Amino acid sequence: MDQQNHTRRNFYVRAINLLGAVITAALALPAAAYLLIKPNSQDSGEFIEVADLSQLTPGKPEEVVYRRTRVDGWKRMEEKTTTWVVKNQDKTVAFAPSCTHLGCAYHWNDEIQSFLCPCHSSVFALDGTVVSGPAARPLDRYVSKTVAGKLLISQKLEKVGSNASA
């Protein structure tokens, strides 16, 4: 009976089973880590410097291009993005670059002195409120602060309701 346990066939069966277990562990451990361990992510409340306030003209919207680091799961991406900045006498506002109707990119139109979404003809005033069009709420604003003459924004949006004053 002892000799039957040590046959060549039993040896191959055990070796194949061991190899299968090693392959299964090699595939299962990274998959389990991916599903169970939370990735490190950037704090969405982190402020990014986007503009020097001395370079901005009061009452004139300017599209400011800046670089930010975005974390998507385990992937960290450096990307270029924009914000519309309006410097007023008392406060500077940074608007998200997409229309609140369907997320299209809008632009400032000097002729009508308003933000205009070319896709669906939504029109927004200088303060981001809806003038006309299908958009039901004002432009979204980034949470921002001014430090040493520089405008810093967070990627968190401060949504302004349709009845709220801007």
Image (tube, grey):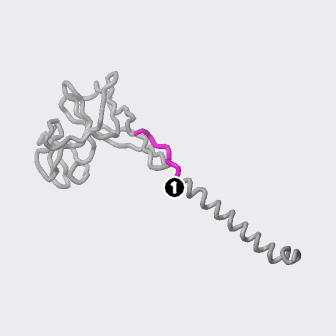
Q: Is residue 128 left or right of residue 26?
A: left
Furthest residue in direction top, as rendered? 148
Look at the numbered disc 1 and give the secondary structure of its residue: helix
Image location (x, y in percent) of residue 53: 29, 26
Furthest residue in direction right, as rendered? 3
Q: Nearest the camera: 6 or 116? A: 6
Q: The magenta stretch spans which residues?
A: 36-43
Instruction: Say if the magenta span includes residue 85.
Output: no
Q: Residue placed at 61% from the left, 61% from the top?
A: 27
What residue does disc 1 label? 35
Q: What amino acid is at disc 1? A: Leu
Image location (x, y in percent) of residue 143: 29, 35
Q: Nearest the camera: 23 or 93? A: 23
Q: Is residue 163 left or right of residue 12?
A: left
Q: Residue placed at 47% from the left, 50% from the top?
A: 73
Q: Nearest the camera: 91 or 12? A: 12
Image location (x, y in percent) of residue 149: 31, 23
Vertical placement of 41 versus 50: above or below? below
Q: Residue placed at 18% from the left, 31% from the top?
A: 59
Q: Main secondary structure of the magenta part?
A: loop
Quadrant where the C terminus is found in the figure: top left
Image location (x, y in percent) of residue 5: 83, 74
Vertical placement of 69 versus 51: above or below? below
Q: Residues within 10 Å of mark 1 (few under 14, many from 20)?
A: few
Quadrant where the N terminus is found in the figure: bottom right
